Image (tube, rainbow, N blue to C red):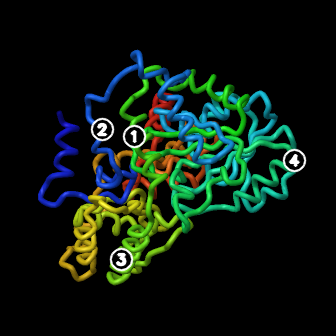
Amino acid sequence: MNLYKTIENMLNDGKPYISMHVPGHKNNTIGYLSMIDARFDMTEIDGLDDLHEPEGILKKINQNLSQKYPGYIAQMMVNGTTNGMISAIFALKNKTVRFVIVDHAHKSVYHGMQLTGADYIEAASAELFDLQINAGDTIILTYPTYTGDTIDVQAIIAYAHRHNARVITDEAHGAHFDIVPGFPESSMKHDSDITIQSYHKMLPALTMASVIFTKSQPLHDEVMKYINYFETSSPSYLVMLSIESAHEFYKTYHPESFFENRSVIIEALRKQKLTVEKKADPAKILLSHPELSSYKLAKILAEQHHIHHEMVTDEGVLWCLPLFHRGDRYPLETLIHRIGDITRDSGIPMQSVQNIESKETARLLSDVRVLLNNVCRRNIVPYPPGIPLVREGEVITEEHIKTITHNMYNRVRIEGVKHNLEHYKNEES
């Protein structure tokens, strides 16, 4: 029971850790997941319907989800947005001559390209309107970004549709959009053809809870064909219950305490000389300090104050704020108290926040130059955010090596490095 003990210790030690990361229920302090218990872990017996071809209670939940954006057909998923993205790409592959991947996409998009063998190009959102778009194109948008930034999704979708192209939107981090005034609009307000939302990221649902929305019945039917291929045939009723609960939360949400508490948090951070960058999504903020690297700041927050972030990059430490509501159980007072201790003169010895490399990390750092000028055998992906740094088939350059070693030195998790190293070491031997 090592995993149980690890999580139990994190939640119940003398200084329980505070979540500033996903999932949106924030250790079951936001929303109403307490209503779910292990007895509800059922299977597709009589009365509980079939997620892959719903006709009863699960169909009713999907219909309720469809009301979020009139004109769309919704389908619950228990394999996350990754499942939805790959299914959407397969569903449109026969109508698509060329996929256009806009800005920085999640690894699931590139996995979909590899699995289908589809032709694709990459384009920056600012340059998209200079491209010759036509009916053979399908545009893939990531909206919002992992850090809560947005693009002019209305203009891009309108441009695509004027040229009879289609749009798939990875809206994993936007299931809470349109929840109240002050939050960005969903791509579905502007007629994205397929949009996939991760209900678990910012709404209070269990991890892997996602919903895919399609704009027409024929397209929905084609998407369902591939969801049935890729999604588990034993879906979790606990995850589906959490989607239903999160959707009810979304429909009945009142914003007063969110914006008030957000202001309190930002003010407390700024009093400690931290720079707070607000994002288009008000539930995300990026923290930095003029005298600390973002990696050292993240280490101080996590190890000294037990406040755990969503992601850290050179730009800063990303926090996902809770969707505060009446009756929530989020430890706001404790958070503010701990923020009050974040100062350079708080007694934290600076040597305690230096990067202490494990033997394994040190070995990888010394070996990684083996990859220079070799072809990438498996995607190299910092995670989070899950955006490939080097894709399979690309030549690994000096710039790639610098970025990989920089991330590894700062103890950022990177997928694929070990696989590539093992391949080329075995090849040499």
Verify CB contact (< 8 Å) between mark 4 and mark 3: no
Residue denoted by label 3: 264
Q: Earlier in the sequence, mark 4 or mark 3?
A: 4
Residue furthest top in the image: 46
> What is the distance, in whole Å, between disc 4 and disc 3 at their CAs?
47 Å
Image depth: mark 1 or mark 3 in front: 1
Identify the secondary structure beneath mark 4. loop
Residue in the image at 53% along x and 29% along y: 59
> What is the distance, in whole Å, between disc 4 and disc 2 at their CAs?
47 Å
> What is the distance, in whole Å, between disc 4 and disc 1 at their CAs?
39 Å
Identify the secondary structure beneath mark 2. loop
- Residue 147 lies, with reference to residue 383, above or below; the image says below
Residue in the image at 82% along x and 54% along y: 159
Quick one: quadrant of the N terminus?
A: top left
Residue denoted by label 2: 36
Residue in the image at 26% along x and 58% along y: 329
Image depth: mark 4 or mark 2 in front: 2
Residue 178 location, x and y as percent?
A: 57, 58
- Residue 134 lies, with reference to residue 240, above or below; the image says below
Residue in the image at 70% along x and 29% along y: 117
Quarter of image, res 93: top right
Image depth: mark 4 or mark 1 in front: 1
Residue 97 location, x and y as percent?
A: 81, 34
Verify CB contact (< 8 Å) between mark 2 and mark 1: yes
Q: Earlier in the sequence, mark 4 or mark 1?
A: 4
Identify which residue, 146 or 52, lies in the foreground: 52
- Residue 89 lies, with reference to residue 365, above or below; the image says above
Q: Earlier in the sequence, mark 2 or mark 1?
A: 2
The disc labelled 3 sits on which kind of residue?
Val
Give the label on residue 163, or none.
4
